[in-house]
Image (cartoon, rainbow, N blue to C red):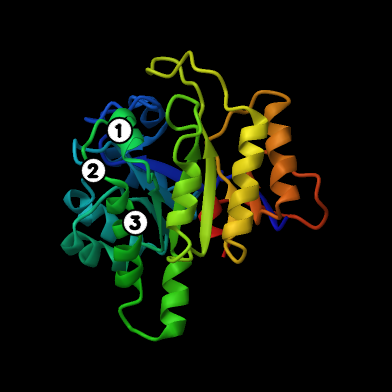
């Protein structure tokens, strides 16, 4: 284990305030309420308390976040030397090319199972669209060419895979991992569904810890050189969170967020976990 993460130096910013057109079953805009609206973010950042931002927001019916519409703010943040991790959704190739010079990292929710995409995200996109997005951002970041540029670009594209996204059931997670083998991501950040009040999934059970164990083991087997991490979105009820941290240590995860690992020689990271390198 390389780090424990408490991202207090990263400001979460929503480009859509508290609204989201998708009304996904697992979120329904709930987590946007805890973010700073983009209209107020500049004032907060001018305090100097934050070293980076998580740029996020609600998606439209096609899974796109309106990032280009806020290019002036993005440019200003970049010019201040404040690092940007963008939760990008599905962007056009043209927009990826335009935005990539400003983003230090991108975080891409990755779903491979078409049924899960349709049922949870309420969109007719496919798993292939998410793999295309990962490749598209990698290509934009590695535009200079060469093998070193490609390796560096992949370090800037952070795959997020939610276990139990379809109502707490493990459906498509193994296939999602298989779909990434040829791509060979530099990192995969695992999330675990949180049954959240006010969503369609508020009453579903927490994913069984043995099912999480199985997915972690499969990922480590199939992606042996990929940095695996436990991200911030997971149930934090005792003893579940501690059990997740123990599994992360067992499968040699690079780091965990919001859980205290008992592994020796761990560093404290105070920004989004994607900034671990």
Q: Residue at x 65, y 23 (%)?
A: 237
Q: Position of residue 74 (x, y in %)?
A: 28, 56
Q: Residues within 10 Å of mark 3 (few under 14, many from 20)?
A: some
Q: Can you say which quadrant of the picture contains the N terminus?
A: bottom right
Q: Secondary structure at mark 2?
A: loop
Q: Position of residue 84 (x, y in %)?
A: 40, 57
Q: Residue at x 71, y 42 (%)?
A: 247
Q: Secondary structure at mark 1?
A: helix
Numbered mark located on residue 131 in the image: 3
Q: How far apart are labels 2 and 1 at the CA level?
A: 9 Å
The answer to whether residue 199 is above or below residue 277 is above
Numbered mark located on residue 221 in the image: none
Q: Are marks 2 and 1 in contact (CB under 8 Å)?
A: yes
Quadrant assignment, res 120: top left
Q: Nearer the viewer, residue 103 or 203?
A: 203
Q: Can you say which quadrant of the picture contains the C terminus?
A: bottom right
Q: How far apart are labels 1 and 3 at the CA level?
A: 16 Å
Numbered mark located on residue 125 in the image: 2
Q: Position of residue 223 (x, y in %)?
A: 57, 60
Q: Which residue is mark 1?
A: 121
Q: Is residue 257 left or right of residue 95?
A: right
Task: Name which of mark 1 and mark 3 comes first in the sequence.
Answer: 1
The answer to whether residue 21 is above or below residue 261 is above
Q: Is residue 5 visible?
A: no
Q: Residues within 10 Å of mark 1 (few under 14, many from 20)?
A: many
The answer to whether residue 227 is above or below residue 216 is below
Q: Are marks 3 and 2 in contact (CB under 8 Å)?
A: no
């Amino acid at each position: 284990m390389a780090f424990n993460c408490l991202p207090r130096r990263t400001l979460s910013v929503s480009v859509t305030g508290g609204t989201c057109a998708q009304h996904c079953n697992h979120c329904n805009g709930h987590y946007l309420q805890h973010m700073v609206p983009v209209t107020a973010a500049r004032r907060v950042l001018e305090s100097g308390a934050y070293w980076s931002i998580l740029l996020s927001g609600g998606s439209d019916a096609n899974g796109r976040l309106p990032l280009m519409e806020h290019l002036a703010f993005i440019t200003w943040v970049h010019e201040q030397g404040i690092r940007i991790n963008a939760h990008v959704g599905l962007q056009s190739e043209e927009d990826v090319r335009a935005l990539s010079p400003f983003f230090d990292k991108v975080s891409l929710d990755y779903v491979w199972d078409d049924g899960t995409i349709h049922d949870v995200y309420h969109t007719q996109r496919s798993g292939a669209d998410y793999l295309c997005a990962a490749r598209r951002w990698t290509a934009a970041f590695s535009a200079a060419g060469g093998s070193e540029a490609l390796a560096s670009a992949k370090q800037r594209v952070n795959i997020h895979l939610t276990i139990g996204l379809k109502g707490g059931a493990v459906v498509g997670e193994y296939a999602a991992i298989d779909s990434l083998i040829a791509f060979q991501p530099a990192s995969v950040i695992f999330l675990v569904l949180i049954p959240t009040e006010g969503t369609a999934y508020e009453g579903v059970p927490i994913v069984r810890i043995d099912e999480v164990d199985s997915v972690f083991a499969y990922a480590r087997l199939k992606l042996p050189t990929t940095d695996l991490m436990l991200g911030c979105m997971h149930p934090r009820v005792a003893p579940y969170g501690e059990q997740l941290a123990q599994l992360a240590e067992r499968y040699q995860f690079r780091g965990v967020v919001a859980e205290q690992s008992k592994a020796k020689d761990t560093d404290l990271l105070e920004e989004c976990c994607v900034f671990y390198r």
